[in-house]
Image (cartoon, rainbow, N blue to C red):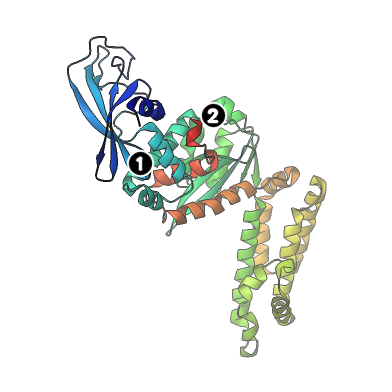
Amino acid sequence: MGLELLTELLELPGCFVKEITRRDKDIILTVESEGYPRCPECGQIYLDAPKDRRYQEVEDLSAFGKRCYLKVLKYRITCSCGYNGTEYLEWLDRYQRFTVRYRKWIYAFCKRMTGIDVSRIFGISKHTVYRLDKEGIEEELSKQEEIRPSRISIDEISRKKGHRYATIISSPVEKKVLEVVKGRKAEDITPFFKGKDKKWRDSIKVVSMDAWLAYRKVISKYCTQAVICFDHFHLAQHFSKAIDKLRVHEAKKAGKENKEFYKGSRWLLLKRPENLKDGQDAALQGLFKINEKLYKAYILRDEFRRIFSGATPHSRLIRLTNWIKRAKEVRIPELTEFVKQIEKWDPYIRNSLRGNHSNSFAEGINTKIRVIQRMAYGYKNFEYLRLKILQQFNFKEIKSIFDG
């Protein structure tokens, strides 16, 4: 293969291939510049080439199943703008040991594979893979246009065991993640909203969240035009905890002859009626025969779920009012405590029912984040976890390297 043809195939702007050699199993291409050296800071061209020059070896995409390295002759310049370093090359970023296209190739693999697997395939260290992945995400973030949503969701995820949380702020309409914040306290999420201009904050009309007080405080302070809506998924979780508390209390009171009915009942009580199998339904009916309180709680839980499936805002609001009335009448302490919370949160629940808003997109994000965490065994570095979450929701698409 002639050097002219090889130069044409390599497509390295401003450079030509001077020599091709072998080193063990690797291909080495000696490359030199055709034009004059240029400052990477101000773009000044040096017509008189500096005398100080040296070769730098960088890795390019593999060829014919062999690793390919470019031995590049680079000039060192001292520019009037204050820059002191090597000349500008379009296809090679400063301080990199890989060509731009090689870095993009690694980054594309990192969008779908674990860093460990990518490092094994390319024969480079996992630390190098992580660095190139992070740089790729940061580059895409810098080019991303600011998202100006009218509706946002706020939800928490567990980063590690021991109540270590992060807060996910997302845009369900645009289906993008706006930010991942370390922690869930008011002081943790305040900088995000404080950093946005007033026009951005005032454009937020609906905020879906759970009942965490810190979130409400921050939104009430910075997004004054927003309506706060409590997510019914989280409300259902609170109800499930109330039922489980009742189950534990009733099981302790049960006589020896009835203990068997309570075994394995926890998950059965939390299942939807339509999801029960034949044997499970029979087990529940046996429990309900000996414990009327659990039966009433189970019926109320199913009715509570149906509140949010009403066809119109009016029907949903009426269902909530009627449900609260019925729940009070059963006079079960564990449920009475839950009803008091519902009445306390009533304005935010009704906001949700009027607009039929939920945190379903945020819940979907949490499910995917758990997959991301498992792929990298938890991401000990929070900043990298943050970047990976942003990548997987905002820059997931892969473009062919052959498209330029």
- Examine the rendered structure and indicate whether residue 381 appears above or below residue 8: below
For numbered disc 2, what is the local secondary structure? loop
Front position in the image: 360 or 125: 125
The image position of residue 176, as x and y in percent, is: 57, 39
Position in image of residue 73 (x %, y %):
24, 25
Query: Please, what secondary structure does the residue beneath circle 1 have?
Result: helix
- Quarter of the N terminus within the rendering: top left
The residue to which callout 2 is attached is 146
**Residue type for callout 2:** Glu
Q: Which amino acid, by three-letter code, is at mark 1?
A: Arg
Q: Of callouts 1 and 2, which one flags the residue occurring earlier in the amino acid sequence?
A: 1
Task: Name the image quarter holding residue 282.
Answer: bottom right
Residue at horizontal 31%, vertical 48%?
A: 125
| Crowd band around label 2 with a 10 angstrom C-alpha radius: few (<14), some (14–19), many (20+) | few
Indicate which label's residue lies in the foreground, 1 or 2.
1
Indicate whether 394 appears above or below 358: above
On screen, residue 229 versus residue 322, left or right, reads left
| Residue 131 image label | 1
44 is higher (above) or lower (below) than 300: above
